[in-house]
Every structure is written in structure tokens, then in C-alpha cells.
Image (spheres, rainbow, N blue to C red):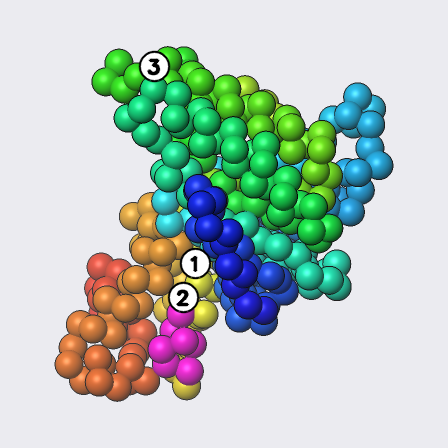
């Protein structure tokens, strides 16, 4: 599906993509999480997009807001896109994925952040919603947009911080009331930096931590299969690498980069990655393969 053109003069929107798109399936299938997490996220998104319009805001107050929280490298942004694509496939119809850049709003001009943010929620997103399709809006690194008012830095203008965050909260409420076909997926590396009132509006907050041994083995199998499809590395060796990664508190991105480090450790591997062995991975992970076998 093509990426749609962002209307001229629209602030904060990086792109609008029509889903499903087969090229986006990797964003779902190649993110490995603890069992049950993906199902919970997809079930909520489908429920929100399909049923929110008929729900009383008193009987079941659903804001259409999902928050993915966790340290960098846990796949939050990639997962958000894969989640939207998976929902589009399940709904069997076109879905619009709107990518918002919160860093586009801060301004040195008093009140300008508030006005820009208000325009996004009160005008731009409702205009997109009026196209009649399900809409998923990504608020990546939302701590830059819904800044905690309790911790406003004295080095910034605390009045503008309060006004901007107030505009986000009012905007989320406005979209929840007027655009039932819109669901937000927000990501944050720093939940403590997100305003408490924003988090209280979230229907689901999913904490994504560093992967465990089982998830790392799957990540390694996937990454090795990408660079060396005919590799015959044993699962037992991958588990030893995974244990070392867990001990080092490695995130998913670092685990994939470990395979890159292994294949670029020698010139022959860099030219022919299919020669990658378990010993190369163990060395890259800081495991002495010979000592480990004693």
C-alpha cells in the first residue's frame, strides 16, 4: 500500500500509510515477546477500532489509548507499526497509520507548542478520521509531548510545558469523544517523564522489558537465518549465547547487533556470512567456547 501525502502545512505528522502492507508483516512476526503480550495488544486494538463507537463513555470509558513502555531497544516503535498492520489484516480493510513526531512541537515562542498541539488533535486528526477508515495514530516517545507537569524543568518555560501538556490531554479527550475510529499507540522510554494524567487515560499500559533466554534464542535464530540461511548452529549453542546476553541485560536490538559483530569480526565472514559458526557467536557474546565445554 502506498504512503499517502501529508497535507501541506500540517505540523507534527511524519507520514500517513495505508495498511495492510505485506512489507510490514516483519514488524509483527519478527518481534519476539513473552507469550500472550501480542495477543493482548492485538485484541485491544481490534476491540477499540470495532466497538468503541457504540460504548457509553460512562458505562465503559475507553479512550482508545495504548501505551508501550520500556527501555530503548525493546522494539516498541517497530511493534506499533506491526500491530497496526496486523489489525488491518484482521479487519480485512484499509486502515490509516499516522506517524506523529512529538519533537516537532516544542517552540521558543510562549504558547506556540500549545497551539500546534491543539491543531493536531482538534483539526488535523479529526480531518483524517472523517475519511471513514480505521485510524491508528503513533505517538512515539510521548514523553516529549505529554511532559509531566510535576517535573517541569526550571531551564524550560514551565508555563508553556503546562499549557502544552494540557492541550494534549484535552486533545486526547476530544478525539475519544468525536473520533471513535481513531486509536492511539504511544511509546515511551521514560514513563516517569510522562504526565500522570496522560497515563491515567490509557486503556492498556504494556511494559516491555529486556528479552529472556527463550526470546533471545528466537531472535538469534531469526537474525542468523537472515545473514546465514544455511547455518547449522545448534540450539544449545544459541542458548549459551542467550544466557550471556541476559547476564549483560542486552535488549533485542543489541542481540541482533551481536550477530552483526560476529560476522564482521573477520574478513572471511564479512565477505561470506554463511561461514558463521557457533564459536563466532559465542566469542562475540564474550563466552569462551572451549572453556564452556570443559
**Image coordinates for residue 108, horizontal then vertical, percent:** 28, 26
To which quarter of the image does residue 254 belong? Answer: bottom left
In percent of the image, x 42 and y 82: which residue is there? 229
Residues shaded magenta:
223-229
| Distance from Cα at disc 2 to Cα at disc 1 | 6 Å
Instruction: Please name the residue that numbered disc 2 is placed on.
Output: 220
Q: Is residue 228 magenta?
A: yes
Task: State which quadrant residue 129 falls in.
Answer: top right
Which SS class for mark 2? helix
Disc 3 versus disc 1: nearer the observer: 3
Vertical order, 2 against 196 (above or below): below
Identify the element where label 1 is drawn.
Answer: helix
- Point out which mark residue 216 bears: 1
State yes or no: discs 3 and 2 in contact (Cβ < 8 Å). no
Marks 3 and 1, Cα distance to the nearest angstrom?
Answer: 42 Å
Q: x, y (%) of residue 242? A: 38, 58
What residue is pinned by disc 3? 158
* Figure quadrant of the C terminus: bottom left
x and y percent of residue 182 in the render? 66, 42
Give the number of the mark in front: 3 or 2: 3
Q: Is residue 36 visible?
A: no
Asked whether 51 falls inside the magenta stretch, the response is: no
Image check: 268 left or right of 204? Answer: left
On the question of residue 135 being in view, the answer is yes
State the residue in front, 117 or 54: 117
**Upstream in the sequence, badge 3 or badge 2?**
3
Label pair 2/1, CB-CB below 8 angstroms: yes
State the residue lying farthest toward the front: 8
Mark 3 Cα shell of 10 Å, populated few (<14), some (14-19), many (≥20)? some
Magenta stretch secondary structure, dominant: helix
Task: Classify mark 2: residues with Cα within 10 Å, few (<14), some (14-19) or many (20+).
Answer: many
Instruction: Give neighbour class at mark 1: few <14, some 14-19, many 20+ (Cα, 10 Å).
Output: many
Amino acid at each position: 500500500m502506498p504512503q499517502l501525502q501529508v497535507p501541506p502545512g500540517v505540523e507534527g505528522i511524519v507520514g500517513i500509510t495505508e495498511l495492510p502492507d505485506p512489507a510490514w508483516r516483519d514488524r509483527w512476526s519478527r518481534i519476539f515477546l513473552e507469550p500472550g503480550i501480542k495477543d493482548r495488544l492485538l485484541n485491544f486494538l481490534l476491540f477499540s477500532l470495532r466497538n468503541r463507537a457504540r460504548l457509553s463513555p460512562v458505562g465503559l470509558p475507553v479512550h482508545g489509548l495504548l501505551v508501550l513502555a520500556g527501555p530503548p531497544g525493546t522494539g516498541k516503535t517497530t511493534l506499533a507499526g506491526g500491530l497496526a498492520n496486523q489489525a488491518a489484516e484482521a479487519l480485512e480493510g484499509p486502515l490509516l497509520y499516522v506517524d506523529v513526531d512529538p519533537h516537532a512541537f516544542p517552540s521558543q515562542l510562549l504558547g506556540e507548542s500549545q497551539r500546534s498541539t491543539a491543531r493536531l488533535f482538534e483539526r488535523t486528526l479529526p480531518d483524517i478520521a472523517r475519511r471513514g477508515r480505521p485510524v491508528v495514530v503513533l505517538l512515539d516517545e510521548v514523553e516529549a509531548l505529554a511532559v509531566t507537569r510535576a517535573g517541569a524543568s526550571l531551564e524550560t518555560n514551565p508555563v508553556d510545558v503546562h499549557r502544552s501538556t494540557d492541550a494534549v490531554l484535552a486533545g486526547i479527550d476530544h478525539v475519544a469523544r468525536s473520533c471513535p475510529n481513531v486509536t492511539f499507540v504511544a511509546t515511551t522510554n521514560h514513563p516517569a517523564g510522562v504526565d500522570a494524567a496522560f497515563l491515567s487515560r490509557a486503556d492498556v499500559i504494556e511494559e516491555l522489558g529486556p528479552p529472556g533466554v527463550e526470546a533471545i534464542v528466537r531472535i538469534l535464530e531469526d537474525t542468523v537465518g537472515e545473514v546465514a540461511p544455511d547455518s547449522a548452529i545448534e540450539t544449545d549453542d544459541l542458548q549459551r549465547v542467550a544466557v550471556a546476553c541476559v547476564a549483560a541485560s542486552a535488549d533485542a536490538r543489541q542481540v541482533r547487533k551481536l550477530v552483526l559483530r560476529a560476522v564482521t569480526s573477520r574478513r572471511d565472514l564479512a565477505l561470506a556470512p554463511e561461514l558463521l559458526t557457533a564459536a563466532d557467536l559465542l566469542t562475540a557474546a564474550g563466552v569462551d567456547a572451549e572453556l564452556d565445554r570443559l
